[in-house]
Image (cartoon, rainbow, N blue to C red):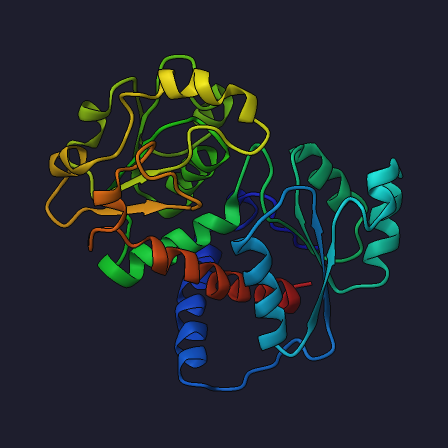
Amino acid sequence: MRHFLTLKDFTPEELKQLIDRAIELKRMHKAGEVYEPLKNKVLAMIFDKSSTRTRVSFEAGMVQFGGGAIFLSPNDTQLGRGEPVEDSSRVISSMVDMVMIRTFDHNMVERFADYSSVPVINALTDDYHPCQLLADMQTYVEHRGSIEGKTVTWVGDGNNMCHSYINAADRFGFNLNIATPEGYEPRADIVAEADAEIALFNDVASAVKGSDLIVTDVWASMGQEEEQKKRETAFADFQVDSSVMALANDGALFMHCLPAHRGEEVSAEVMDNPESIVWDEAENRLHAQKALVEFLHLNR
């Protein structure tokens, strides 16, 4: 049984194949072609964390593929009332064709996958956000071609997005600079396990020089709201603004997984500049995940 819990569940060749397929599925969608490989198939969508892009992209993708999706919040299942993950996995997977989970604890997704009889997709945990990286890689390829050998700089918190960028550097072959305040670095074990050129910085200027892509995220993720004021102080010098973008290579692009807080992690000037490709990046969640769902369906 194939699952997609981190980018490392797929080989570099499979991931490149997914990106190519996502671009083709996008072309087909824009051309109005009807393609329904998942006719009468059902995706269960388990949400412990709220979302805009994740829910709309997966649900719309299943409809476009001829299937359907069931939205399940903690109030809608016995998971929210303490039923063991293993029991819920056995039951839910017996009734649907695929399961998508967006939650806090990465271990919960791993346990669910261990007992599932259908493919499981990690749609975000506190440790990883691999689906977003599929969209990011698709977007870069569409605008600049292959990302292999390029330099990407992550600015901000060493969070789940940062961890998935580390995995992406391993799988897609780019160099990764990570600029974080002291004490907010990514997990050392994830860095150590990556077969990639990764450099850690505690200042932005040194990290972004020579970069082809600059990426950031909110300073306080879901579940960290009580740390907002503390983080605003710690991250005060880690905003991506026009002066930061000017230090990167000519033609460098900017990405953000959204939602963005203009005036905090990114300036409005950068966010709304043509070098920002965040709207293509957001739309590509739909196309990249359709490629992923199709792949998992065909490779069960």
Left or right: where does residue 69 sit relative to residue 249? right
Tell me the quadrant of the picture where the C terminus can be found. Answer: bottom right
Residue 69, given in percent of the width and then of the height, sits at 70, 66
Residue drawn at the location 56% of the way across and 32% of the way down: 127
Q: Nearer the viewer, residue 123 or 14?
A: 123
From where the camera sits, is residue 35 visible? yes
Left or right, 218 with reference to 236: right
Residue 23 location, quadrant: bottom left
Q: Is residue 235 depicted above or below 110 in this figure? A: above
Q: Position of residue 261 (x, y in %)?
A: 38, 38
Q: Position of residue 79 (x, y in %)?
A: 83, 42
Residue 8 in the image, given as x and y percentages of width and height: 52, 43
Frontmost residue, 264 versus 107: 264
Residue shown at the point (18%, 25%) measured from the top left: 205
Where's the N terminus, which quadrant?
bottom right
Compared with residue 60, is residue 10 higher up or lower down, i.e. above or below? above
Q: Residue at x 40, y 66 (%)?
A: 20
| Location of residue 273 with respect to 96 vertically, above or below | above
Whether residue 85 sits left or right of residue 16 in the image: it is right
- Number of numbered labels in the structure image: 0
Residue 154 left/right relative to 192: left
